[in-house]
Each structure stands twice: as C-alpha cells, then as structure tokens.
C-alpha cells in the first residue's frame, strides 16, 4: 500500500564548497523503508568530506527510519558524531541520539548453528537424561507409596475421588459405546465366516474369547490412555508452567503424594472396572448382531456363552489391566512433570504421552499373550 | 487532528462475577501523553486495558480508540486498528515456540510482508537494542530468559510496528530499579520523538513521579483522581493519601 506511493526523492545530496549536504525529504518511517533504502543507495557519499544532514524538509521520522539512516551513513564512514545536524527538531535529535547510543552499546548478534554431530550428541544426551529421569520418577513414586503405607492418614481422599470420577465414571459411556461397536463388527465378520461352514453357533465361542481376553481390555486401555493420560499430562504440565508444583513443594508437601498417587490409584482401580463394563457392552453388541443377522436368539447366545467362556478367561483379560494402568499413569505423570515452562512444551509432552502410553499398552499386551499362551475352552 | 483525543472512554461499566468492577469510568488521552493508571489490586486495571484493546467487551459505556468506536468496528477494521497500537502484557506473553528475534519479527512479517529480510532484521536488532536486551538474547527461547528480560523482549515486539499508541501493563514490575529508570528514559524519548501516546498501569512510584504526565486513579469502580501527579497526590482521599504516604514513610 505505502510502497506504491507517488515517486518523489526521499533524499538529495548536494556538494558545495563547505562539503556535502544531505537533504531529507518527506516521511522517514517504517512503511517507506524499502524506498528509503533504495534512495540512499543511489547517493554517492564521499567518506572523506564532511557531511551536513539537513532536515528542513523532513516531515516525520520514526525509530526505524532514523536507525536505517544512521546505519547507512555509518557504513559510509560518517558516524553520528561526525555529522553536522541542521534543521532537526529537539525530538528528532533525541531520537537520533537514542538510536545511535543503543547501537554503539550492543554489537551485532551471532547466530547459533548446530552441526550433525551436535544434533546427534544432543539427542543421545537427551535420551540418556530422559531414561535417568524416568527411573528416578519410578523410584520417587515408590518412595511416596512406602510413605503412604507408613502414614495411611496422608492419603488425599478428595483428589482421589475427583480422579476416580474423571477417569472412571465419566469414561463409562464412551468405553461402552466403543466396545459395543467392536462387538457388533467382530460378531458380524466372524458370523459370515462361520456361516460358510454352517457353524454359526461357533460365533459365540470366538466372540466370547476375543472380547473377554483381548478386545475389551485393550480398547479400554487405549481409550483411557488417550483420555485420562492426555488429561494428566496437560493438567500437570500447566501446573508446572504456572509454578503450582513448585508451590506445592515449598509448602512442604510432596507433589507425588498430592498429585501422582491419587491419579495412579484412580487409574489402577478404574481400568479393571471399565474393562468389565467393556466386556458386557462388547458381548451385548455381539449378541444383538447374532440375533438379528445370524439367526441365533439371545437366550441361545447367552446359554452357549456360559458353556464356552470360562471365568478364567474373563479374569485373565482383567488381570492385564492393572499393568496397563500402571504404565499409563507413570508415563502421563512423568511426562507432565517434565514439561518446561512454555506452552509448546505442554503440547509436545501431551502428544508424547498418548503415543508412548498406547505403545506401552500394546507391548505389555503382547508380553502377556506370549507369557500365557494356553487358552482354556 | 492532534486535538482529537487518542483514547476516549465514556461511562464504562464492567461486571465480573456479579460484582461491578467498573462503575462509570470516563477519561481521555491526548497525543503525546504518558498516562499512568493506578489503583489497588483488583480494581480492574488489567481488565480495563483488555477492554481498551478490544480483547473484552465492556458491559456498558463506550470506548473510542484513535477516533473509532470499538463497539461499531467489524473484525477487519478492528484488525487494522490493532496494527496502530502496541500492547505489553503483564507477563510478556511471548510466543514460547519462537526465539526472541522471531517474536519481534512476527508483527513485521505479518503486517509488512513486502519488507525485505535484511531491513526486517535491521529493525528487529534496533528494537531489541532500544529495550536494552543483551545481544545474545535474540537467539534464545523465551523460556530461557529471566522475567525482566522477557518483559523487555515483549516491549520490543509491541514497538515493532512503530505504534501510535502503546498500552503497557505493569512495564517496570520485575525490573531492577536501574533498568526501570532506563526503561522510563527510553519511553520518554520514544514518546517525545514519535508522538506516541502511552497508557500504562504501574505500582512503581518512581515511574509515576518521573515519567507520567498525568495519572488516573481508580477506586471502587470510579475515577477518583485525574491530573498531574502533584495535583493528584494532593487530593484529600483516604486511599490516595495512603498510597502516596507509603513513600514518605520510608
């Protein structure tokens, strides 16, 4: 907009008997900076002859304009101290002096650059430090647990119940809905395969085993990792940013007792319960599909389920969940505590919590699958 | 045009949580003035600044900035108006994902995209130097700076577009007295030479005496004093008396 203003010279240079005179015209302001730069460049200033700066026709001068003028003249061998200033207002002189003085004090900045080796080393160092911090976190949580056993009165009941509600109660609808849908899809796919062999009733065996042993605990853990894990990290991270965690420490309290243990216990308690509701919802979904599409009435479905799904399989599915819970809570809380004091860090750590806890849940699940391969039927 | 007030606040009212924080506040600012807004904690100084820049709607009354009524502006006009003033937040509010130099360059890059990079860097260097940041601060992340340095970097960002009007929320809190006085001097020169108008909130009595042309005192939702420091300090009012007495006791 301002760059397309009508062309008029912003400065002229006259060489006379007493030396050179640089006349400034019009506005020397930020918006006209490119034109001012071009105008100054066309002038051929002799560094050896004295220079007068005439501001008689100058309208406005701002700090960007003054700075550019002085920088240019300085490069041409005419620092402010050597200039003769004519026609400047008192304010204009003050501005020139301010800009020039500051310029002298601060030398041009050097930019930092990192080579490949530095980057590699930095990442290796960060990895090692992260591993050490993780171990320290586990240790500190253990210590806090031990302290809690010695003094059970120090349990934060209110925080625990708040977390039980947030982690457990409020997750029930979404957990049940997801698992219901998984049950529907699973029963439908399995049913189509089984119908080919004329053995639709075997759907009940497959669905019961699959949902109780794998799907319900796994889907629930992934949901909780995304839901509560992310919430833990974001909450603790924001507290870290606003120094609330430091405040807890200076009040003589342990952030592990106040913040970590209630969350850990809440998830440990709630994940098995949520998994059970997931079992129920998944099997209900499967039974509905079986009744509507595979011609197995609900009563037949449930009576066969009682025969083919032993309690031990359901319990095996639920037994895995405390291990998932431990991993999610530890990753989320540690991640929250290691947030640095800026907003970007909160986002990065929340993302990493979700990814790492889902990966951890899947790893633990496969470890269980390998460790206990026999399936009772 | 210079006679037209830069900021005009007319019987502004604010309700926060069922409580009237501002009840009929009116004042005007003229070009080239440095006006300090004082008042006890919780008298809504920060809220008032937020309303002046259009971050919050007043619950009553009118705010005119640079001759334009904020309530009647569309979002595009408001954006255009926002380029003409700078705002320094209480704790800086630097973009934490960017280095200090990039923070200062952001308004330039967004609003003057045709400005060549060398010129932009020249301006960034100037603004950082003007606010007295050491040269190595430019390449640092905001989280690596001390509170006072963050504040200066934020001021450099507020100054980047050569604003006509500057709102400063507690600019010298968190600065040591030497830096605070230097900040006052810098601000004075900028105001005098650039015809800047400044509205600042402060608890710094030295800034009040040395820097402000005028002070406005908020008390229980009203303006109880508006004028030069000397005049306001002489007003017979319990709170004003107590405020200025904290100094004479020392």
Image (cartoon, rainbow, N blue to C red):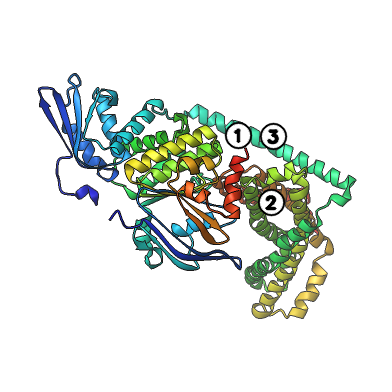
Pair 2/3: label in front: 3
Residue A5: horizontal and vertical position, in percent?
Answer: 19, 49
- Residue under the point 53% across and 56% down: B218
Which chain does tag 2 point to?
A
Residue A74: horizontal and vertical position, in percent?
Answer: 27, 26
Q: Nearer the viewer, residue A176 or A15?
A: A15
Q: Nearer the viewer, residue A106 or B23?
A: B23
Helix, strand or loop under label 1: helix
- Residue under the point 76% across and 51% down: A264
Circles 1 and 2 on the same subunit: yes
Of labels 1 and 2, earlier in sequence is 1
Give the Cα separation between the discs numbered 3 and 1.
10 Å
Q: Quadrant of the C terminus of chain B?
A: top right
Q: What is the quadrant of residue A298 in the picture?
A: bottom right
Give the Cα separation between the discs numbered 2 and 3.
21 Å
Pair 1/2: label in front: 1
Helix, strand or loop under label 2: helix
Judge the density around disc 2: few (<14), some (14-19), many (≥20) Cα neighbours within 10 Å: many
Question: Which residue is labeled 2 in the image?
Answer: A361
Q: Nearer the viewer, residue A345 or B212?
A: B212
Find residue A132 and name its label: 3
């Amino acid at each position: 907009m301002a760059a397309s203003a009508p062309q008029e010279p912003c400065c002229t240079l006259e060489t006379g008997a007493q030396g050179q005179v640089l006349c400034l015209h019009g506005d020397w302001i930020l918006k006209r900076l490119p034109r001012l730069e071009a105008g100054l460049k066309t002038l051929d200033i002799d560094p050896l002859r004295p220079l007068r700066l005439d501001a008689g026709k100058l309208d406005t001068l701002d700090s960007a304009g003054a700075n550019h003028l002085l920088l240019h003249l300085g490069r041409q061998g005419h620092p402010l101290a050597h200039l003769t200033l004519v026609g400047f207002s008192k304010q204009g002189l003050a501005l020139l002096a301010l800009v020039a003085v500051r310029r002298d004090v601060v030398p041009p900045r050097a930019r930092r650059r990192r080579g490949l080796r530095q980057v590699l080393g930095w990442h290796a160092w960060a990895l090692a430090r992260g591993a050490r911090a993780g171990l320290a976190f586990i240790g500190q949580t253990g210590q806090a647990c031990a302290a809690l056993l010695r003094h059970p009165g120090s349990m934060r009941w209110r925080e625990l119940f708040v977390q039980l509600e947030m982690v457990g109660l409020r997750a029930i609808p979404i957990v049940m809905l997801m698992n219901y849908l998984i049950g529907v899809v699973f029963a439908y796919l399995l049913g189509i395969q089984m119908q080919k062999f004329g053995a639709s009733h075997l759907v009940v065996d497959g669905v019961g085993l699959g949902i109780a042993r794998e799907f319900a605990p796994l889907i629930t853990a992934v949901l909780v990792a995304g839901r509560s894990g992310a919430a833990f990290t974001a909450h603790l991270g924001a507290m870290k940013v606003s120094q609330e965690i430091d405040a807890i420490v200076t009040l003589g309290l342990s952030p592990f007792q106040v913040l970590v243990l209630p969350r850990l216990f809440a998830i440990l308690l709630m994940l098995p319960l949520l998994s059970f509701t997931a079992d129920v919802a998944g099997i209900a979904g499967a039974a509905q599909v079986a009744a509507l599409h595979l011609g197995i009435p609900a009563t037949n479905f449930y009576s066969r389920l009682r025969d083919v799904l032993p309690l031990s399989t359901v319990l095996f599915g639920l037994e895995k969940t405390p291990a998932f819970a431990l991993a999610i809570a530890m990753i989320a809380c540690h991640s929250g505590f290691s947030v640095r004091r800026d907003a970007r860090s909160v986002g990065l750590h929340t993302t990493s919590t979700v990814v790492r806890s889902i990966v951890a849940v899947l790893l633990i699940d496969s470890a269980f699958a390998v460790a206990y391969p026999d399936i009772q039927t | 045009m210079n006679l037209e007030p830069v900021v005009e606040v007319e019987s502004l009212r604010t309700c926060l949580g069922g409580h009237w924080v501002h009840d009929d506040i009116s004042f005007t600012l003229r070009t080239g003035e440095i006006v300090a807004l004082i008042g006890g904690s919780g008298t809504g100084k920060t809220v008032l600044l937020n309303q002046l820049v259009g971050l919050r709607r007043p619950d009553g009354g009118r705010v005119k900035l640079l001759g334009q009524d904020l309530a009647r502006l569309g979002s595009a006009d408001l954006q255009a108006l926002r380029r003409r003033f700078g705002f320094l937040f209480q704790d800086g509010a630097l973009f934490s994902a960017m280095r200090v130099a990039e923070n200062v360059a952001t308004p330039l890059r967004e609003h003057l995209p045709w400005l060549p990079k060398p010129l932009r860097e020249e301006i960034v260097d100037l603004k950082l130097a003007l606010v007295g940041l050491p040269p190595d601060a430019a390449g640092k992340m905001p989280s690596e700076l001390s509170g006072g340095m963050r504040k200066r970097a934020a001021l450099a960002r507020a100054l980047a577009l050569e604003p006509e009007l500057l709102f400063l929320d507690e600019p010298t809190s968190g600065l040591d007295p030497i830096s605070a006085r230097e900040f006052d001097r810098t601000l004075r020169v900028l105001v005098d030479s650039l015809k800047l108008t400044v509205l600042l909130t402060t608890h710094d009595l030295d800034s009040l005496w040395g820097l402000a042309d005028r002070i406005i005192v908020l008390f229980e939702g009203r303006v109880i004093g508006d004028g030069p420091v000397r005049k306001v300090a002489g007003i017979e009012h319990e709170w004003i008396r107590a405020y200025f007495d904290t100094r004479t006791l020392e």
